[in-house]
Amino acid sequence: MVGIILASHGNFAEGIFQSGSMIFGEQENVKTVTLMPSEGPDDVKAKMKEAIASLDDQEEVLFLVDLWGGTPFNQVNSLFEAHKDKWVIVAGMNLPMLIEAYASRLSMNTAREIAKHILRTAKEGVKVRPEEIESVKATAAAPAQQSNAGAPGTFKYVLARIDSRLLHGQVATAWTKTTRPTRIIVVSDAVAKDELRKKLIQQAAPPGVKAHVVPVEQMIKLAKDDQHFGGQRALLLFENPQDALRAVEGGVPLKTINVGSLAHSPGKVQPNKVLAFGQEDIDTFIKLKEAGLDFDVRKVPNDSKGNMDEIIKKAQGELNRLRKS
């Protein structure tokens, strides 16, 4: 029997699993994977591997995830390449999709067969009242897409963000909805050398937006000669503050940097739930401030902004205490 893994931000996967069981009955070889607020990508990947290992058939697996480009999608996608002949990932999980997948397993033996079959049911399950709203043409959104362009022949930097997770759900949904970029550019020497990570980032781009990965020096060159980009709205993603500082010192004309998330590692302290600083990070943020940049410290647009001066002061105090202990 084809195994099914439901993956989501928060408890959505567990909730929809429970709903599916109420409607269609208890199911074997179905597992849930959740990303909780206190967890990161590595936690999700570990859960994903554990869920896969618990299935009777680990070759034929259908992954139903909540959001294309989100962390649950990205982590299963990072495992997908070695199994792409049989595994299938379907984003946009809803209850009609899940029930149809359960029913399809009774007569279909491959994840690909089931995936093809459930797509139509998933789309047809989205309905609205009053019915005339459904008749609105999707093409009505086309003019808005055209309005994303900036002045001809120049980049417009709509967001520059430091986030060790780079392109993930918060960026692919909340920030792109708010800033409306036409290009997402990951600026990182390390990622530019990693073909798998580059491919995963390109695949995680939201519809209508192209994702690129460039080394820091290449971004500096693009900033100085951006004529061939013809008015693109650019959202820049940096994996760490050091790459952001190199870009700014090299001439990338940024005025504000959004600080979203920095992963914890040995020797670092956590002044809040999502940021981990070592001494080099603190020194780098101070240099960015001295270069005239403002900091926008928040994970998503609706969050209240944190005070970077207070965060740095707290992190420095914790590092000093760590050294003395």
Image: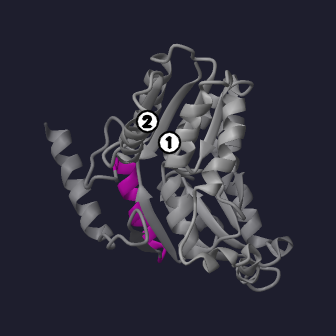
Residue bearing mark 2 = 44
Res 190 seen here: no
Magenta region includes residue 287: yes
Work out whether residue 54 or residue 21 is closer to the camera in this orientation and state it. 21
Question: Which amino acid lies under the numbered mark 1 shown in the image of this protein?
Answer: Pro
Q: On the picture, is 270 further left or further right than 75?
A: left
Residue kind at label 2, given as amino acid type: Val
**Residue at 47%, 39% in the rendered image:** 7
Q: Which residues are magenta?
A: 276-292
* Residue 212 sits in quarter: bottom right
Mark 1 lies on residue: 72
Place of residue 284 in the rendered image (x, y in percent of width and height, measured from the top left): 43, 58
Q: Is residue 187 above or below residue 108?
A: below
The reply to whether dot 1 and dot 2 touch (C-beta < 8 Å) is: yes
Looking at the image, is 121 positioned above or below residue 59? below
Task: State the separation of the CA atoms marked 1 and 2.
Answer: 7 Å
Q: Residue at x 50, y 42 (%)?
A: 72
| Quadrant assignment for the N terminus | top right
Q: Residue at x 57, y 33 (%)?
A: 103
Q: Nearer the viewer, residue 133 or 33?
A: 133
Circle 1 residues within 10 Å: few <14, some 14–19, many ≥20 = many
